[in-house]
């Protein structure tokens, strides 16, 4: 049994029982934590986000409209050799399943009753079989080129984790200058409370051992594409 098969076997075992409800957690304001000051001017949040995301190893494209999004989806399919994809229920992904299907890709969509259970969840084996996972992002963090993935709006946690290629879509209007702009205003940014999982994802997955050898793609996607939606 390969390491990947063993890992997925453990995931399947844990998913044998229904997941708990995605109950919002109460948010408690904390006063007196000093602000983090950056030497860099972060006023151009979109330009900074694009630059920093590229420095993490992500391929970033600015997208002006639906035609541009279809072009980005087609580029990812061609460059990565995608035959099967899973698409989250994030609002940024509304048209993506159709775009992938038009490109000849077999698609599994979160929340689609034709390929999910009664609770709207997609079987983890279906997600693991996909080469591409497409998700939206609730926010982007400019200072670090980070996507903020929200499991509640996505309809699950696995689309941005299991497939080896991840395409994340974030609206330019939802890019924040730095992480403090998210965490200091959680009650405003997440008015329904915290989801069961909020992931800050910065570029391809990296794992390092005691000898400082970096391995890409062990605990998440090894290839990351980001679309910045400018409409």
Image: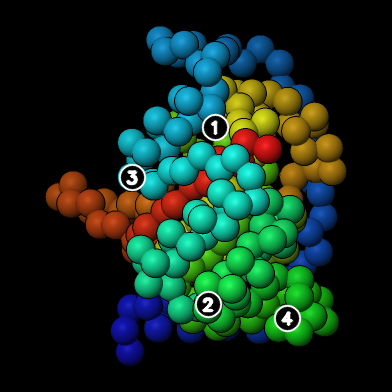
For image coordinates 81% across by 49% down, the residue present is 24
Q: Position of residue 197 (x, y in %)?
A: 65, 53
Label of residue 116 in the image: 4
For image coordinates 71% across by 83% down, the residue present is 115
Q: Secondary structure at mark 1?
A: strand
State which tag comes first along the sequence, 3 or 4. 3
Q: Nearer the viewer, mark 2 or mark 4?
A: 2
Disc 1/disc 4 C-alpha distance (Å): 32 Å
Q: Given contact means CB atoms under 8 Å apart, are the residues at marks 2 and 3 in contact?
A: no
Q: Which residue is mark 2?
A: 105
Q: Nearer the viewer, mark 1 or mark 2?
A: 2
Is 223 situated left or right of 22 in this image?
left
The residue lying furthest to the left in this view is 211
Disc 2/disc 3 C-alpha distance (Å): 25 Å
Q: Position of residue 6 (x, y in %)?
A: 40, 82
Q: Which residue is mark 1?
A: 141
State which tag comes first along the sequence, 1 or 3. 3
Disc 2/disc 4 C-alpha distance (Å): 18 Å
State which tag comes first along the sequence, 2 or 4. 2
For image coordinates 67% across by 31% down, the residue present is 173
Depth order, front residue of 95/112: 95
Q: Which residue is mark 3?
A: 57
Q: Secondary structure at mark 4?
A: loop
């Amino acid at each position: 049994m390969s390491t990947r098969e063993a890992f997925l076997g453990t995931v399947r075992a844990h998913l044998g029982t229904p997941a708990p409800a995605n109950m919002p957690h109460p948010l408690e304001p904390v006063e007196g934590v000093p602000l983090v000051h950056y030497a860099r001017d972060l006023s151009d949040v979109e330009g900074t986000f694009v630059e920093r995301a590229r420095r993490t190893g992500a391929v970033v494209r600015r997208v002006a409209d639906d035609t541009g999004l279809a072009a980005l989806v087609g580029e990812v399919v061609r460059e990565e050799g995608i035959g099967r994809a899973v698409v989250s229920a994030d609002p940024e992904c509304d048209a993506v399943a159709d775009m992938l299907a038009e490109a000849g890709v077999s698609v599994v969509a979160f929340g689609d009753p034709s390929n999910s259970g009664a609770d709207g969840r997609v079987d983890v084996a279906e997600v693991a079989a996909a080469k591409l996972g497409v998700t939206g992002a609730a926010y982007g963090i400019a200072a670090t080129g980070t996507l903020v993935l929200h499991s509640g709006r996505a309809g699950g946690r696995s689309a941005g984790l299991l497939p080896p290629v991840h395409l994340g879509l974030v609206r330019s209007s939802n890019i924040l200058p730095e992480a403090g702009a998210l965490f200091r205003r959680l009650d405003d940014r997440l008015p329904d409370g915290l989801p069961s999982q909020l992931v800050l994802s910065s570029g391809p997955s990296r794992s390092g051992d005691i000898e400082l050898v970096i391995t890409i793609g062990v605990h998440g996607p090894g290839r990351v594409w980001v679309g910045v939606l400018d409409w």
